[in-house]
Amino acid sequence: MSGELRVLGACPLDCPDTCSWVVTVNDGQAVKLRGNPDQPYTRGALCVKVNRYLEHTRAPDRILHPMRRVGPKGSGRFERISWDEALEEIATRLRAIVEEHGGEAIWPYLGTGTLGYLQGCEGVAGRRFWNVLGASKHWLNICSAAGSSGLFRANGTAGGMDPENFALSKLILLWGTNTLTSGHHLWKFIQDARADGAHVVAIDPIRTRTADQADEYLAIRPGTDAALALGLLNVVLAENAQDEAYLAEHTEGWAGFREEILAHPVEKVSEITGIPAADIHRLGTRLARTRPTAIRATMGIQRHAGGGTAMRTIGAIPAVTGDWRHPGGGVAYSTSGHVHLNIDTRDDLLAKPVRTRVMTKLASQLDDVKCLWVYAANPLGSTPDANAIRRQLAREDLFTVVMEQFPTDTVDYADIVLPATMQTEHHDLHAGYGHLYLLWNEAAVEPPGECLSTTETFRRLARHMGLTEPSLYDSDLELAEQLLSSGHPSLEGVTLDRLRKEGWVRMNYPKPFTPFADGFPTRSGRMRFPRPGEAYVPSHATLTADGSPYRLTLVTPASHTFLNTTFGNNAELRRRAKGPVVLVNPADAAARGLVDGLRVRVHNDGGEFLADVEISDRVAPGVVASPKGHWPKLSPGGSNANAVVAERDGDMGKGPGFHDNLVEVSPCAGS
Ligand SMILES: Nc1nc2c(c(=O)[nH]1)N[C@H]1C(S)=C(S)[C@@H](COP(=O)(O)OP(=O)(O)OC[C@H]3O[C@@H](n4cnc5c(=O)[nH]c(N)nc54)[C@H](O)[C@@H]3O)O[C@H]1N2
Ligand SMILES: Nc1nc2c(c(=O)[nH]1)N[C@H]1C(S)=C(S)[C@@H](COP(=O)(O)OP(=O)(O)OC[C@H]3O[C@@H](n4cnc5c(=O)[nH]c(N)nc54)[C@H](O)[C@@H]3O)O[C@H]1N2
Ligand code: SF4
Ligand SMILES: [Mo]
C-alpha cells in the first residue's frame, strides 16, 4: 500500500518482557500494532492489555492540553490553559518555593508508568532540572528494591539467569511469580523445556492461572518462602547433593549457613509454611537430583516484611546445588543488573547535597513539601496508605503538578495538569528486566492535541525559567547517545544508529549466558551466604496475627487485565476484570456468613475498600486475595486495595508490604 510505514518500537510498561513492537502507520495515523515476530523474546506476541494500546492512545478521556484547577482539590474540575500560561504559573510558583523554603521543598515523584530511560523511570529527563533547582531526591523503592537488595547482598548484583536459558532447564520452580499474567513471554521457553522433559512447580499462596498450568502446585503461607528454601536445602544435604567444589571455590559463609539449613528440618518447615511435609520432601529430593534447576522468583515474593531476606535465601539455592555452573540453572529475578548504560545522576549540578524522599512514604514524608511534581505515577491508586495520601494531597499549601495521559485520581488533586505523550508519539530507549536486549522506540506519529514528552516539557520549562545549564537542553537523541556511552563491554558495538535501524540489539552476553559459573561480582569474588539467624524473617502478618483483631492476610497481586493502574480506565479491560473482587476460602466465608457475589468491605485500621466475594479454594484459609490496579474513583466506595496497605518498611531496601497486611472481610451494611 502506498504511504504505509512500519515503525519499530517497544512496549513502555513496567513488565519484565519489554516487547519489541511494530507500528503500522498510514497517512500519519497508527493503524496497527503488533508484536515483532523477528525479536527472539517477543516472538510476535504482545498481551491482552497492550493489544489495546492504540485504542488507548485515542481514548475519549485522554488529556490533550494543559489545565488549571478551578474546583476544590480532589474535584477534578479544570479549565483549559495554554502551555505558556501553565509554564509561567509553574515557574512563578517554583521560584517562590525555592526562595522561601529551599529547593528541597520540591518532591519530584516519578513512578513506573513508563520504563523508558528518556521519558520515564530512570528520570534522565527531569533529574538535571531538579538538581539545578536543588529539589529533594526521589527513591523509587515501590517495586523491586527489597529483592534487589537481598540478591545484591548475596551475589553482588540482582542480575541472574538469562530467562531464555529456561529452555535448557530440567526442573523449573515458578516461585512467587504469576508468569502467565505478569510476563508471559517466559512461558514459551518453559514450554520448550517441558518438551524436553522438564518438571514445572508453582509455589504461591494463590492457585493462579500459572499454577493451573504447572505440573505441581504448593500452596505456601504468605511470607514464609525463606523457610521453605531452607527446608528444601535440608533435603539436598540429606541427599548429600551439595556441590562441594562449587561451595569451596565460589562461596563464603557456608559453614554457618549449613548450620542454619540443618536447623530447618522438613517437619519444622512444614509447620511454618503450611505445606505438607511429604510435598517438601518430594520437591527437595527432586531439587537434589535434577540439574539444571531454574528458579523464577519475581517481585511478589518480596512484598513482605522479610521480602529481602526471602530473595537472598532463595538466591542461595543454586550456590549450594552448583546450578550456577550450568546453562539452564540458577535464579532469575531481574536482568536489570546486567544493564550497564551510563546512568549519570548528575549530582555535579547540585549546589549542595539534598535529602531523599521515599516513594512508598508519600503519606508521611509530605508534611514539609510545598511542591509535589507527579510524573508517570498514580500514587492515589498505587501507593500504600491511600487515605493518608488523599488527606495530604488536599492541603491548600501544597502546589501539585501532574504530568499525565489520563484523568486519574491523582490528577483530580493537581493544581496544574500537563498533557503527556504516549509511546507511539515520542522517542525512547529501553532495556527489559526479563531479558538481555536493548530496544529503541522511534516516535511513529505526531502527538495528539498539545501533548508533550517528558523530555520536551522539562526543556521548555528550563527555558521559561531562564536556566543556563547547557545540558538541560540536550535533545532526546543526544541523551540516548550519552546513555549508550558507558564503555562497558556489554555495550560494545551497540550504537544508537544500529538500534534505530534494527529496533533491538542483544547486549554482548554469550548465549547461553552463565553469569556466575566462575564467580561473583562481590568484593571477594564469592557468593555470600546469609549469616546464622539472618536467613528467615517472618512476615508482618505472621508476627502480629495473635494480637490483631484482623485475621486474614491480604495478597494484592498483578491483575491480568491492568498494568498497575494503567488501563484501569479502559472499558473492555475493566469489563474483563469484573470489578474489584476478593477471593475468600470457603471456610473463611462460612465463618463470616459470606456468599458468592456478595459485596463486602475489606478493612483494617488504615481504611477499607469494597469488593465482590469470590468463594474459592484457590486461596487457603487465612488468606484472601484481590488483584491491584482498580482506579479508586471508578470503584464502589471510591477506594482500592491500597486503602488497607500500610506504609511500612520491609527488611531491606525499604521495600513495601503489598502482600503482607491483615484485614477483615465483612458484609456491607444492607447487603
Ligand atoms: N498483567 C499484569 N502484568 C504485570 C503487572 C500488572 O499489574 N499486570 N505488573 C508489573 C509489575 S509493576 C511488576 S513489579 C511485576 C510483578 O509481577 P509478579 O512478580 O508476578 O508480582 P505479583 O503479582 O505481585 O506476585 C506474584 C505472585 O506472588 C504471589 N505471592 C504473594 N506473596 C507471596 C509469598 O509470600 N510467597 C510466594 N511464594 N508467593 C507470593 C502472588 O500470589 C502472585 O501470584 O509484574 C508486571 N507485570
Ligand atoms: N496493592 C498493591 N499496590 C501496588 C502493587 C501491588 O502489588 N499491590 N505493586 C506496586 C508496583 S510493583 C508498582 S511498580 C507500582 C506502580 O505504581 P505507579 O508508578 O504509580 O504506576 P501506575 O499506577 O501504573 O501509574 C502510572 C501512571 O503513569 C502514566 N504514564 C504512563 N506513561 C507516561 C509517560 O510517558 N509520561 C507521563 N507523564 N505519564 C505516563 C500512566 O497514565 C499512569 O497513570 O504500584 C505498586 N502498587
Ligand atoms: S505489558 Fe509486557 S507482555 Fe504486554 S506488551 Fe508490554 S512488555 Fe509485552
Ligand atoms: Mo512493579
Image (cartoon, rainbow, N blue to C red):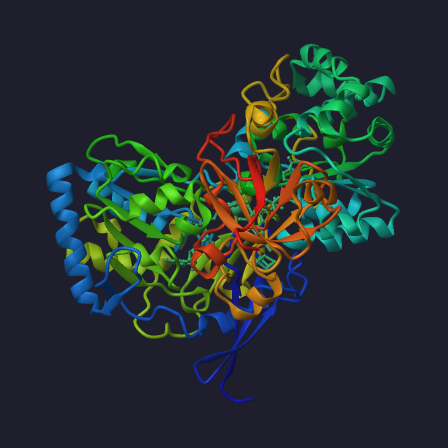
Is 638 drawn above or below residue 261 in the view shown? below
Q: Is any atom of residue 454 visible in this view?
A: no
- The single residue placed furthest to the bottom in the displayed view is 2
Q: Is residue 199 left or right of residue 38?
A: right
> Residue reaching furthest front?
670
Q: Looking at the rendering, in which quadrant would you find the C terminus?
A: bottom right
- Coordinates of residue 359 in the picture (x, y in percent): 39, 40
Out of 303 and 296, give the one closest to the viewer: 303
Q: Quadrant of residue 204?
A: top right
Total count of labels: 0
- In front here: 657 or 93? 657
Whether residue 145 is situated above or below residue 396 in the rendered picture: above
Name the foreground residue: 499 vs 390: 390
Relative to 128, residue 414 above or below: below
Looking at the image, residue 92 sits to the left or right of residue 50; the answer is left
Does 11 sit left or right of 218 as displayed?
left
Q: Is residue 192 above or below residue 570?
A: above
- Residue 91 in sight in this render: yes
Q: Position of residue 153 (x, y in %)?
A: 55, 24
- What residue appears at the point 31 percent right and 56 percent down from the top-left corner? 74
- The image shows residue 518 at horizontal and vertical percentages of 68, 27
For image coordinates 53% across by 39% down, the residue present is 658
Q: Quadrant of the N terminus?
A: bottom right
Q: Tell me which residue sits at (68%, 50%) in the image.
A: 179
Residue 438, percent from left and from top: 54, 53
Q: Quadrant of ligand 1?
A: top right
